[in-house]
Amino acid sequence: MFKKILFATTASPTCDDAAKVAFDLARKYNSTLFTFHVFGIPTRGASPFVVDLKSGEEETYDEDYTAWVKEEMKNTYAKQLQEMDNCVIDCTVGPPHWEILRKAREENVDLIVMGAHTRQEDVGAARYRYIVGSTMQMVARRVRCPVLIVSRPCNTCFWYFSNILFGADFSKASISAFLFAYNTAKAIGCKLYLFNAIDISDMQFGKIAGQEEIESQVLAARKKMEDMYVTRMEGFDNYAIEIWEGIPHVEILKYARKKSVDLIVMSHHTREVDPEKALLGSTVEQVVLRSACPVASVNRPDKVEASFDRHSKAYREKTEAAGT
């Protein structure tokens, strides 16, 4: 299903949760895993000196130093590497998001796995929301394939994946996210929850919706869900539709916990703008920071259909032959 996975890492403990998901996914689907680390930024132009992103020290960028960084990466993931034959360790210098995007294009990967941030911070920290910006934000904005963001240990994941939640927002961008969620569920044979939260946060501005109005919005959302998403399914019936009202990211997380969801799929943004200019939507950002399971941000349709058309048939044949 995922023929090639790129795990973008800082090779530090902050990426341990993402590492577990990346290595487990690669083993599960017999994928080639590219474990990739951008370890420094050139001090200027073609300078032989770089500022190491972990230590902050200026180092000489040459073959020996690069070999040392790769060896450190191998030591960091020694246990995981013992269980895999198709893992490629690589590193480079440069602006992290540029190099991750370049690597993803070069290897034509189907999925990128990365953490939401690179610093050890308490979730309640005042500046935590800002941390989602930088590298992950810029990669998710420009990348052509889905990005699986892991910000916490996955307590519900059991050999990936059993229950998938698609957070529907009815935007044009959400079609790509839906196709990724649907194709994943269909290929694996797991449950797909189509979920929409009617935003009633306007109450704080004095606009309080009556129950009759809320019920009318629920019916309209269900109808839109069926027209926009369900009609795209072909004989797949292992799904459920649920419409709740409340603050969207809160309701998505509550429903995910209720159904023991191990993957949440959402569109990168909801506004009709150029994907490369769109910032990560506030709802998906809040879900990423608080979710107990990985969250897939899907920006474009480019890799969604092609990837699954190419690999889902082979994966089904393999699992059927194994009796799983």
Image (tube, rainbow, N blue to C red):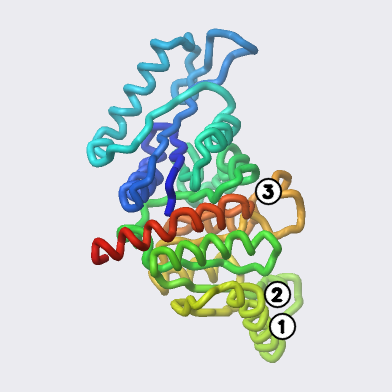
Question: Residue 69's spot in the image, x, y percent?
Answer: 38, 21
Q: CA distance from mark 3 to mark 2?
A: 26 Å
Callout in the foreground (3, 2): 3
What's under tag 3, amino acid-wise?
A: Leu
User: Mark on residue 279?
Assistant: 3
Who is closer to the viewer here, 191 or 292? 191
> Do tag 3 and tag 2 residues touch (Cβ < 8 Å)?
no
Compared with 196, 65 (above or below) is: above
The mark that comes first in sequence, 3 or 1, is 1
What's under tag 2, amino acid-wise?
A: Met
Q: CA distance from mark 1 to mark 2?
A: 7 Å
Task: Give the residue furthest to the bottom.
Answer: 212
Q: Residue at x 38, y 29 (%)?
A: 89
The mark that comes first in sequence, 3 or 2, is 2
Q: Which residue is mark 2?
A: 203
Compared with 245, 136 (above or below) is: above
Q: Residue at x 27, y 36 (%)?
A: 81
Q: For this view, does 172 lie left or right of residue 163? A: right
Q: Which residue is mark 1?
A: 209
